[in-house]
Amino acid sequence: MASVRKVALAYSGGLDTSVMVPWLRERYGCEVVAVVANVGQLEDFEAIRQKALASGASSCYVVDVRETFARDYIFPALRAGAVYEGRYLLGTALARPLIAKVQVEVALRCGCDALAHGCTGKGNDQVRFELAYQALAPHLKVIAPWREWELRSREDEIAYARRHGIPVSATPEKPYSIDQNLWHTSYEGGVLEDPGAMAPPDMFQLTVDPADAPDVPHYVQIGFEGGFPVSLDGARMSPASLIESLNAIAGAHGVGRVDVVENRLVGMKSRGVYETPAGTVLLAALKDLEALTLDRDTLHFKELIAPRYAELVYYGQWYSPLRAALDGFLEVSHRWVTGTVTVKLFKGSCVPVARSSPYSLYRHDLATFGEDAAYNQKDAEGFIHLFGLPTRVFTGVHPEVRDLKVEEQVGG
């Protein structure tokens, strides 16, 4: 076993990392520095700090990076339209590279020679953390207790915690794995491991049941500049404040729930339930504004790269050159994606209903079905003739494709 003197542990105060503090000390005989990144989870951070110290950590650093998370991670992914497999808005995946960055910064400041995380050997997060470590501090040793220790289940962890006097909120009867940050809340484990079972109604924390949402629709206006949200109902806000406010508004109307079976990077399928109220509204509003302000080719190309951007985030490749290069394209493509979009929220639905922009490419004189002088409809004949030229050439060489047979219809 390699010698470890001091390890920086990405600490949440949850079940996994709570038992890792004494486990690391026992297994490696090392000092443990707990690192907590405040990415918007609704937690008592002083209580978490005290819990880490009581569990045996020599120190615990709590770093507030909510604005950094919103500005430098969430909003670029939003601008990219990054949605994994068309449904998951990447709340957990976006937070991991930032949490790892905070952890590395503390580790270097404190003279640590190792980094540890609480990710299981079956999940995506182990990849996300360790790819970030490789990018930011490849010289530090990485310890992944879930890949080493004798504890094989959450029930084993709960028993271990009790033996060491560590209080945990999870129980064998309800061992949900909950991850929460500014962008979303996710749920895995327990009854959710059966994809045929419905999620318990009392599980949700950010959204009301759409059936219980107000019977009157609510309208919100989102302001964008350069593809990034900057205002809510006319009031300019910081990125984190805007997300927090919109989470409350959209969540009260049941917006943002998804229940999915997704393909993990490690090769298995998993079931997750996500609440992303603000993200759902912002994505719908941005796509609506893009339709107004981006030319056809740029919009279509952006739609091509969106799933690739989502894969990079999901796969833990935030610090990859390709992700940075795609952001370079988006920085140029979205220079004029500025304006406002009004969105209707009603019983779980989120529908853009009005939009405006000083850089709108929509021209009434071209689009109108009424009389106009800007568009000569006779020009369409020549356009269609030239547009169909490849088809006419092909069918001239291969006339069999035109050999259409019409079955005789019997009856009347």
Image: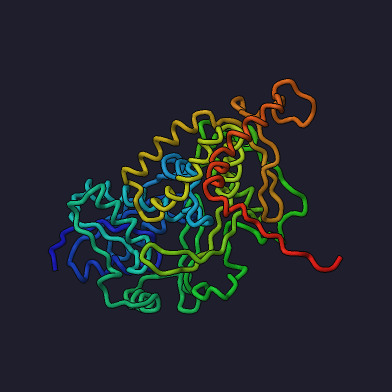
Q: Can residue 228 be seen by looking at this rendering?
A: no
Residues 201 and 343: in front is 343
Which quarter of the rendering shows the C terminus? Answer: bottom right
Report x, y in % for residue 296.
Answer: 56, 35
| Left or right position of 37 against 145 | right
Q: Compared with residue 382, is residue 48 higher up or lower down, i.e. above or below?
A: below
The quarter of the displayed image where residue 60 is located: bottom left
Name which residue lies at 67% across and 31% down: 381
Instruction: Note whether residue 281 is visible.
Output: yes
Q: Is residue 170 above or below residue 133?
A: below
User: Which percent across, then down, holds residue 11?
Assistant: 34, 59
Which residue is rendered at x = 27% and y = 60% of the image?
A: 116
Seen from the viewer's position, the closer of residues 136 and 154 is 136
Residue occupying the point 71% across, 27% down: 378
- Point out the image quarter for the N terminus: bottom left
Work out whether residue 290 or residue 172 is closer to the camera in this orientation and state it. 290
Question: Which color scheme is applied?
Answer: rainbow
Residue 20's place in the image compared with 82, above or below, is below
For this orientation, the residue located farthest to the top is: 373
Image position of 319 (left or right of 292) = left
Q: Position of residue 202 (x, y in %)?
A: 61, 68
Q: How many marks?
A: 0
